[in-house]
Image (tube, grey):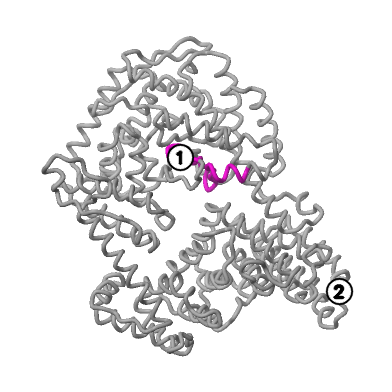
Amino acid sequence: MDDKNNIALDTEAQRLFEQFGGLQHYDKKATLRQAQDLAQSLLDEQKRHDATRILLVQAAWLISRYLAHPDFGNAESREVKAFTHLAKYLVKLGRIPGHLGFMMIRYRGVSADPDIPEKYDYEVVLGHTMVDSIIVRHTARRNGSDYAKLPDRLLEACTVMADYGVNNIYVRLTEDINQNLAQIRLCLKILSGFRKARHGDQPITVKSAKGALTIPVINDENMFPDPNLTLLSGLNRLSPTTMASLVDKIDQWLRKRGTGSDVRQFAGIYNAALNFPKISAKVKTPPVELNNIKWLISETEDEEVSTNKVGIAKLALEMAGASPQTVTKMIQSIYGDDYAKVNKLMLGERLHLSSNLLDAAQARSKEQQLTQELISNLQSRLDQVKDQVIDDLQVVEDTGEANKVGREKPKEMVNSEIYRMVSFYKGRSHTRKKMKGMVHQAITFTDQDYAILAKDFRISKKDAEALVGKLKSCFNAQGRFSKRAFAEAVDHFRLYEQKIFQFLWHHMKDVVLPPDRTAFLNALQALTTQMDQPKKAFKILLEDFCNDPADIQFSDNKAIMLANLIIHRDKSMTDYDITPEDVVLSRHHIDTMVAQYAAWRIEKEHEAFSTKLQTIHTRLNEALQVGHTGGRRIPAMLLLNLERELYIFLSLVECETGKTLLKSAVFEYGNPGSRIFQLKESQNHLSALLQNLRVSLRGVGSVGGMSDIAMLESIKTNEETFSRLKNDRQHRAQTRNITEWVDEAIKLIKFRA
């Protein structure tokens, strides 16, 4: 171990953690600090999460030392130093709100980093905070030269885990983890010697100040060495005979109950054993687990997993048990949530793996429910793949000829069911191109096109023809969009709401002529208010908004406005060009389920969401200096409206990140000396800038606490300075309302307290 570097980084991590308080709220002192601009506040918000990410990387690296050094099972000095640091990190992680009771290192194998091979693509997770090879580089850059080696440290840990064959490491974090540190240390020492012991006949030897402990490797029901059964044995001092009897009894019980019973929810003997009350009451559950397949198909201890999902996981384990990383990839090929982002190579590999799983499932005539599980899940995920990726993909149908002549099947050869799926989506891509093309020219649709649309929208062929006709009627011969025709077609489009919004948003908004862009997006607003189940549309909007955090689209403003409309569900907002800010005060219309999903999504994708807000605010400052942004030439007024919609959105969603960002907005917009009021074009937009102050104040009033009142009161002292920003009667009249806005926000906080 590089002790010098480790100690230095530990000291800096401690400083950063204390400075930003892990994931705690801003304290009272923080709210009284000198106001800073929103860009810096957004950076500080990211650094709050960085404090946790640094701890996660350090903890993962130290855990990897146990896998890299078989002699860590002995009582030797390097191990003592390693665990001393690891214990400090785990204690800190255990005190961070929202950790969900565990820290996890898991193999992903879908690296978006061109410098990191997929073999070394792992992520480290604590609650909604995640760090991987890309995020760790951003973390290092944000926090200075003291963290320059942090990416190398994560890569070193991932290299060790890939060599060891890790697909996941699970570490339980209890409320008082200090009591479990000795057990964690014992588990890590056992894992340190597990790989060497499983390949030989020698047991694992663990030495400590109290003496030596001999732990034999325990096999599962299929006579494969099982790390978690070995941990269970070593932690509870259970003999090989006792463990063999335990494994045999549970295996027999599972077999007697049959494959169709609820016992299928147990992913392996180890997990089944810990779910038996008579067993769990007598043994200690290992606080560390290695390659427990349960954590490849569930996120938390109490998550209910379907028996079919467990069956697929077991099937993957049987087929690729010797390669833990392949097990992960097989499960991802069926249950991955990132198909919208996959490229051609990644998709080809997933189809190859899922094809192997499907072949195996179809060979089991008594378990046809697994075949249906595979087909339905894969179909729903292929539905998310971008058309261009589907177009470039090449697959060959497996007709069984390769097996007849004893040849190895090429990777592009897939199961007939999968081949038919891919063929359909290729056809759908072609038909979609026609639907987009008919906006600008006459397009002839064939019976095959209508058949594809009918299948895609789950409607009849006749209805598919009517849908194309309705959509075409919304554009004239010159390709100009008719809002009136669209309004007349809304009732018809509602019949296909599960598909039509996705198509219109993803494929049509970019082909309408620039002069019609606003009218088209407003028409989608009208459609949204008529939808019976708008949650899917909300998911589409939020994913699209965060898709490229470093860029801004003209549609981003409307995306957030539509999201506000869906959350609030007040149909009277349909005809507004902007979201009325009064919705912040009226919370009884809020769709709680949608708001909770949004809060979860923001926290889970904090890095992308915060970066997007940074991009927007940076571009706003640029536009206020020169009149518009570079590149897309987005005007300042649109960006001001976008920020305004975001403040309303964060007020309705009510999450920790949102609260912090709203306070940051008040910090900047509440200070007349802020740079945003001094830029070249700021004078022309003072009214909108002050409106953003009012909205952010209402937001803090709606979601803030008593500790925020002092910060809000300080805004009042700036009223006179605000009035001098422009010698204009209307402006001075607006600034005289600042005290009223602040008092309104304080009243809201006190009312909820």
Residue type at mark 1?
Pro
- According to the picture, the residue beneath numbered tag 1 turns out to be 117
Label 1, label 2: how far apart the Cα atoms are: 58 Å
At x 58%, y 22%, the residue is: 1
Q: What crowding class fits label 1: few (fewer than 14 Cα within 10 Å), some (14-19), or many (20 or more)?
A: few
As drawn, 558 above or below 417: below
Q: Tell me residue 368's x, y (percent).
A: 18, 51
Q: Circle 1 sits in a helix, a strand or a loop, which is it?
A: loop
- According to the picture, the residue beneath numbered tag 2 turns out to be 723
As drawn, 732 above or below 104: below
At x 60%, y 43%, the residue is: 137
- The answer to whether residue 90 is visible is no
Residue nearest the viewer, comparing 657 with 751: 657
496 left or right of 129 in image: left
Q: Tell me residue 119's x, y (percent).
A: 42, 37
Residue type at mark 2?
Ser
